Amino acid sequence: MIHPITSRANIRIKLAMALEKPSSCRKRNRFLMEGPKFIRDHLSRHGSIDFVVLSQQASKEAAMVAEAADSSGHSVIQVPEDIFAGISNTETPQGITAICPTPEYSTDDLFTGKTVLVLDRIADPGNAGTAIRSASAFGCSGVIFLKGSVFPWSPKVTRSAAGINSAIPICEVDDLKEIQAKHSGYCFLGARSDGRPMAELFNDLAKPVCIIIGSEAHGISQTSESLISDAVSIPMVKDVESLNAGVSASILLSNLFRKNS
């Protein structure tokens, strides 16, 4: 049964409104997932949901997803449009959002013998979300967000990742020192414009790979740089600026996947 709520003082509404800020998400171990498609996909994966918020002016598709959530035992509340506007982060919301527990993984869950992607000070949500989607598409076992990167479950990252950030293991860590020492069976590579061409380097690999992508502005951090065994580059025509982090990650992961398939 879908329950109507009209008060901003309601505890669920206050929680949903607070999740716009990463600090509140971390404090409560919760994040927002917006949009009928992403929520429907999350439900199909049997992902965890605390409750669903439906606008009184929701799209037909959103209303159908809310009904499906309700039928599968999830709590659904319906609110006036002005209250929903205080929850949604999208410019053209479709009238549905889900409050979900933040997935919890350890780095041991990521280092399973498959490729691991590391995002080093990637602050742009679009790049981070693209990298997450590519990590999932190209068989990575997980993604590590290093200190200085965007919050992996912010609404903008979730939209850019198409909700896949709730499906692929993700960890936030300060740096890679202990991880690199613990997982010596991995080859730690850094993406760098002056690195070895990816086709040449990937053909020489005998170990599973942990590949580090840095920001366009700063590259990978000095700490990460000190831990890599080699640097890898993407061949490009001359006089072209560097690719953004999301595109770089996608190209490198695609080629690694092709090499390992």
Image: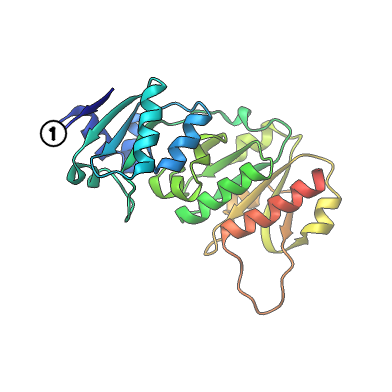
Relative horizontal placement of residue 258, taking residue 21 as reference (left or right): right
Relative horizontal placement of residue 209, taking residue 168 as reference (left or right): right
Which residue is at 18% across, 40% downward? 80
Q: Please indicate, yes or no, whether residue 29 appears anywhere in the rendered image.
A: no
Q: Position of residue 82 (x, y in %)?
A: 18, 46
Residue 100's place in the image compared with 128, above or below, is above
Q: Nearer the viewer, residue 13 or 123?
A: 13
Which residue is at 48% across, 51% downward? 160
Q: Nearer the viewer, residue 166 or 243?
A: 166
Residue placed under numbered mark 1 in the picture: 7
Q: Position of residue 183 (x, y in %)?
A: 70, 33
**Mark 1 neighbour density, 10 Å: few (under 14) some (14–19) many (20 or more):** few
Q: How is the structure coloured here?
A: rainbow
In which image quadrant can residue 109 be found?
top right
Relative horizontal placement of residue 143, taking residue 48 as reference (left or right): right
Residue, far bottom? 239
Q: Position of residue 12 (x, y in %)?
A: 24, 29
Position of the C terminus, as image quadrant, is top right
Which residue is at 70% across, 78% downward? 238
* Dot 1: element: loop
Looking at the image, how many numbered discs can be counted on the residues? 1
> In the image, what residue type sits under mark 1?
Ser
Q: Position of residue 65 (x, y in %)?
A: 40, 35
Which residue is at 14% across, 34% downward? 6
Q: Please indicate, yes or no, whether residue 163 appears anywhere in the rendered image.
A: yes
Residue 47's place in the image compared with 241, above or below, is above
